[in-house]
Amino acid sequence: MRLIIRISAVLVAGLLLGLPVAQAQREKLPPEDLEFVEKTWPEAKKTNTGIRYIILREGQGDSPKPGDKVQVLYVGRLLGGAIFDQADDPAKPFVFRVRREMVIEGWEQTLQLMKRGEKRLVIIPPELAYGTRGQPPKIPRRATLVFEIELLNFGKE
């Protein structure tokens, strides 16, 4: 009992002092998707929210901030490789503002980590994409999505 009280006291003190407290992160990819992803992209890094990524081309400079207008090229695929959406013409990039709920949460998080000119392969778990509903008929329920995203440019206007 004393050990539990002592551990609780340490955790509370750490929270009050703003110290980082270790938390176990649960895996967000469904087990069958996780196995496929780990075999297919073993070098992928993982963010603390469960997004996996590979930097295909380094970018430079700052990263977009909430409210910035970004210009991106992308190809979106289901885990099996089928393309469900794309904007791959540099003359007609996909343009939107970061953190204005115009794209899935996985994109919001990813773009704020990218730099101008960077290209990434990004694997987004269902809960940071279209979740349990999907986006029929192109995206099924609970779909893990794979994107190649290239951040062309961004700014306030």
Image (tube, rainbow, N blue to C red):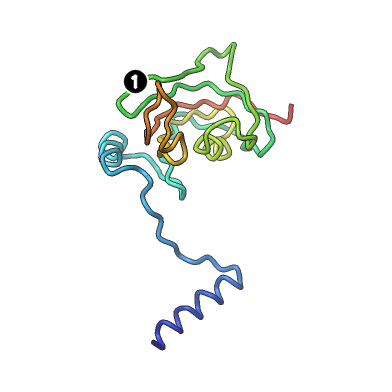
Find the residue positioned furthest to the bottom.
2
User: Left or right: 26 with respect to 10?
Assistant: left
Quarter of the image for residue 124 reads top left
Where residue 97 appears, as percent x and y from the top left, is 65, 30
Res 53 visible: no
Q: At 41% across and 88% down in the image, what residue appears?
A: 2
Rendered position, 50 above or below 80 = below
Q: Give the quadrant of the C terminus.
A: top right
Q: Amino acid at mark 1?
A: Ala
Q: Quadrant of residue 33?
A: top left
Residue behind mark 1: 82
Q: Is 42 on the left or on the right of 23, as rendered?
A: left
State the residue at coordinates (46%, 48%).
49
The residue positioned farthest toward the right in the image shown:
157
Is disc 1 placed on a helix, strand or loop? Answer: loop
Q: Pinpoint residue 128: horizontal percent, then vertical percent.
A: 47, 40
Front-most of residues 134 and 66: 134
* Residue drawn at point x = 38 percent, y = 46 percent: 28
Q: Position of residue 96 (x, y in %)?
A: 63, 26
Q: Is residue 138 left or right of residue 67?
A: left
Residue 21, above or below 132: below
- What residue is rendered at 46% in x and 31% in y? 120
